Amino acid sequence: MVFSSHIFLFYFLPLSLVFYYCTPRRGKNIILTGISYIFYGWSNPLFTLLMLFSTAIDYFCGLIIGESGEERLLYRKTALYVSIASNLSLLCFFKYTGFALESYNQLFLFFNVENFDAVPVLNFLLPLGISFYTFQSMSYTIDVYRREADHIRNFLDFACFVSMFPQLVAGPIIRFQEVAEQLASRVHSFEKFARGVAFFSLGMAKKVLLANSCGKIADITFSAGSTYWLDAWYGIVAYAFQIYFDFSGYSDMAIGLGLMFGFVFAKNFDSPYISTSITEFWRRWHISLSTWLREYLYIPLGGNRKGTTRTAINLAIVMLLGGLWHGASWNFVIWGALHGALMGGERLFGRKPLYCSLPRPLQVVATFILVLIAWVFFRAENLGDAFLYLGSMFNLVTVPESSFLLDGLLYSPYHLLAMALAGIVVWCMPQTWDWTRSMTVSKVVSILMLFILSVAILSMQSYNPFIYFNF
């Protein structure tokens, strides 16, 4: 079930809110947990058993860690390692088994090893949101181990934290210490609920009106094979808009839903395409993942405490693993490696890019171009398609005359309008987080009109993918 669907908008969400607000305060977490399990199991009920298994392991590990004193350090460490190992094992088994076996076979075929029998490749159905809730659940045991949060004794409260449906299947990744107090007691108010509705409506408008329109352009160019350089750049810019509005729109909807149920989640996007460096880009893009990787991977590796060179290496390792987290493909590995190399290079050059002497607008343009080049690997189906598309972008491939036929599809008035509006929102409009801090009559009318328009468009279009559902 996706947020931008009629069944969610007009059936699931209204009924969930009615049940939630009709329940006494002590039972709200129970109701929210039940609602979340229904939401998660909508497409495949068996997925709920996997999430329940992961939840139970981390809950009992958290009990052991939290109730063991420093004199029982061995118990605490063992419980922490069990939690981390179980979560990573689930993630690796379902997400990376097929990739590892396929890479193993390709390695032997590449070296033309005689008498090599290829290993059968096993591909498992990837449970929705497993990349998100395993990281989220691990943050609990790590925070408790670090004494940065108290452990939970009530299993249902912890199950509510892990399964909370607004951010369950595509983030943002909520760290336990951010919502620990809210799980125990939170404020429900008309102002908070109204801001939640505004967040949700604006997020859906981003998704339905902008992401879907730009996504059609990206799909056309990436499925066309070799194209003219202008079409290729046009297509990758469209994909950059699509993935931004798709994911930031989903994050806005998740934050809005959280507010409706009394929770305040942290900002997940902060105008990333106005960044003047790749380092700044990752402070603005998918902030919850960047924060998680920094707190639980980068700092344990040594962070910036062991010299500039080691810091650059740590950044490269973190981004490489961050790329692999997004998907089991060499495309994602290369995407992460590119960002890691660029961030590491910026650290070696004094935390600045090589083009830091340019005027700020040109720094933004240069950073955006680097991000676009990396997005090619993120979007392409395989490495061959990625390099072919890059060849088209830099006019290095032969383009068939039939490519002219794409112009009628790519540059229709509808698509040009969508791209123009997307660019205006990206570079000129304030963030949802800031714009909804105060509500005026004009803002309320604008939000209502956008919501009605989004629902109307949604009823007429069949193209409605959520990119990050795949991760």
Image (cartoon, rainbow, N blue to C red):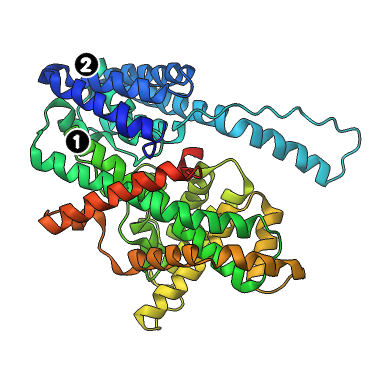
Query: Considering only vertical position in the picture, is 49 above or below 434?
Result: above
Looking at the image, residue 97 lies above or below residue 254: above
Mark 2, residue position:
154
Type of amino acid at the residue the image marks with label 1: Met
- 271 sits left or right of 134 in the view: left
**Place of residue 181 in the rendered image (x, y in percent of width and height, measured from the top left):** 15, 32
Which residue appears farthest toward the right when viewing the image? 114
Report how many numbered discs are placed on residues in the image: 2
Q: Which residue is mark 1?
A: 260
Q: x%, y% of residue 275?
A: 36, 67
Local SS, label 2:
loop
Residue 183 shows in this picture? yes
| Distance between the alpha carbons at the discs numbered 1 and 2 | 23 Å
Answer with the quarter of the image where residue 417 lies: bottom left
Residue 338, percent from left and from top: 54, 60
Q: Nearer the viewer, mark 1 or mark 2?
A: 1
Q: Which residue is at 32% across, 61% downward?
A: 271
